[in-house]
Image (cartoon, rainbow, N blue to C red):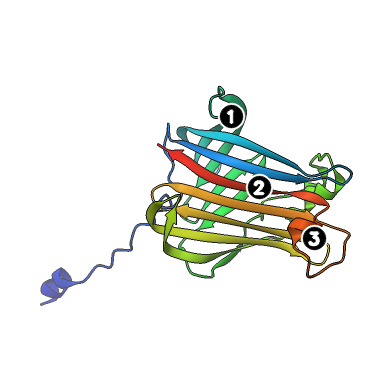
Amino acid sequence: MLLTLAACETVLIQPEVQPQRYFPASEGMVREYRVDTIHYRETLGSDTQRWYVRQVLGPEMLDLEGQTTYTVEVYRRRQPADNWQYHRTDLIRLSDQRAEYVENNLRFIKLVFPMVQGLRWNGHAFLSDLSSVPVTESCNNYQFLEGWQFHYTELDQFVLFDGIPLDSTVLVTQTGEQNLIEFNQSSERYAAGIGLIWRRFEHLTTQTICPECPWTEKAECGFAVEQWLQSSE
């Protein structure tokens, strides 16, 4: 009887964590984006720039902490007909708990697992000594990145992206300091099997106290970046 009970015992198998569903990574993967940036100047007029950016993933490696990593070679060009020019090398770090992206030696926690509606985390927890990062204008000192809260605002959401139906996407809202003279916020949308498809990042400051005025009109310093996926392979 004991043998029979043992043979019939139910074994609970935990579902495998698949962090790459919304953050896929493999050697040779290529993503291309269009990136529009508006720079708000303290002494000059605002400046709008457009870049086309290409990301190429290198081979899978393990870092000193035993985490899966990929180098990301970043190229950019001004016009679609121009040749790609090497810009910098970033890094992706993946684990069962989170997906991280390292840009200019700044380490961001982009996604955490498992994904739960409303789940919050400090996406900039690994950023330190931000006051020492060189900037061209004092109002853009990287200390504005301290203490940002990330949270999932949409999960498994259907969207039409540039006319293309995507069955499953997630939206991450990222919020920093917001008051009468400073506005810090970002949103990123990821699609299953593709990765990041859209991003908007805003760091805006002003000395004009006008609560009802749109930030796009009263911003005196800072920048706004919007990024769209053009192709993925």
Left or right: 104, with 111 as reference point: right
Please give the name of the residue rendered at 53% of the width and 65% of the height, measured from the top-left corner: 152
For label 1, the residue is 79
Left or right: 70, with 204 as reference point: left
Residue 182: image tag: 3
Sequence-wise, which precedes: disc 3 or disc 1? 1
Estimate the x, y position of residue 220 in percent, counting from the top left: 83, 52
Query: What is the spatial separation of the Cα atoms under label 3 and label 1, in whole angstroms?
Result: 33 Å
- SS assignment at label 2: strand
Query: What is the spatial separation of the Cα atoms under label 2 and label 1, in whole angstroms?
Result: 18 Å
Q: Nearer the viewer, residue 143 or 37?
A: 37
Sequence-wise, which precedes: disc 2 or disc 3? 3
For label 2, the residue is 225
Estimate the x, y position of residue 60 in percent, counting from the top left: 45, 35
Nearer mark to the viewer, of 3 and 1: 1
Residue 66 visible in the shown view: no
Sequence-wise, which precedes: disc 2 or disc 1? 1
Query: What is the spatial separation of the Cα atoms under label 2 and label 3, in whole angstroms?
Result: 16 Å
Instruction: Give the class, few, some or many, for how many residues have Cα within 10 Å of label 1's Cα (few <14, many ≥20).
Output: few
Q: Nearer the viewer, residue 167 or 47?
A: 47
Position of 18 relative to 76 (above/below): below
Please give the name of the residue rendered at 88% of the width and 61% of the height, measured from the top-left corner: 208
Amino acid identity at mark 1 = Gln
Please give the name of the residue rendered at 59% of the width and 57% of the height, measured from the top-left corner: 187
Amino acid identity at mark 2 = Val
- SS assignment at label 3: strand
Nearer mark to the viewer, of 2 and 1: 1
